[in-house]
Amino acid sequence: MDLLHSTWFWVLLIIGPIVTVVGTLARLSKKQGPIKLPPGVIPGTYATDKQDDDEDDDRPAKQP
């Protein structure tokens, strides 16, 4: 009987974290709705990589 109890203990000890990780990943993979912004806040867009490169050209070069 002790072997049965210890076997189930180790099975649950191994399976528990796996089920937790799979459940967490499944919850995170769901698409979330839009974020509610405070009144008066207008949603903006992020700068593209090209816009970031253009902004870097305007700055003076770093001196070593």
Image (cartoon, rainbow, N blue to C red):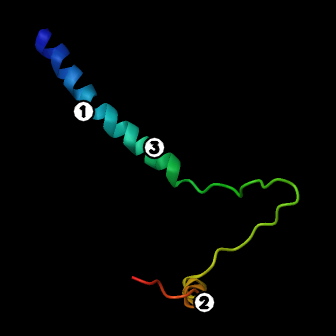
In the displayed orientation, state which residue is furthest to the front: 64
- Single out the mark in the foreground, 3 or 2: 2
* Residue at image coords 81%, 66%: 42
Q: Position of residue 16 (x, y in %)?
A: 32, 31
Name the quarter where the C terminus is drawn: bottom left
- The crowding category of the residue bearing disc 3, from other C-alpha atoms within 10 Å (few below 14, some 14 to 19, many at least 20), is few
* Residue at image coords 82%, 53%: 38
N-term mark: 1 or 2 = 1
From the viewer's side, name the closer residue of 31 and 46.
Answer: 46
User: What is the three-letter code of the residue carrying label 2?
Assistant: Asp
User: What is the three-letter code of the residue carrying label 3?
Assistant: Thr
- The crowding category of the residue bearing disc 2, from other C-alpha atoms within 10 Å (few below 14, some 14 to 19, many at least 20), is few
User: What is the three-letter code of the residue carrying label 1?
Assistant: Ile
In the displayed orientation, state which residue is furthest to the right: 40
| Rendered image quadrant of residue 63 | bottom left
| Rendered image quadrant of residue 43 | bottom right
Determine the secondary structure under disc 3.
helix
**Residue hosting label 2:** 58
| Rendered image quadrant of residue 9 | top left
Name the quarter where the N terminus is drawn: top left
From the viewer's side, name the closer residue of 32 and 36.
Answer: 36
- CA gap between label 1 and label 2 equals 56 Å
In the displayed orientation, state which residue is furthest to the left: 3
Residue 37 shown left or right of residue 62 in the figure: right
- Single out the mark in the foreground, 1 or 2: 2
Q: Position of residue 62 (x, y in %)?
A: 47, 83
* Residue at image coords 57%, 86%: 59
**Residue hosting label 3:** 24
**Residue hosting label 1:** 14
Determine the secondary structure under disc 2.
helix
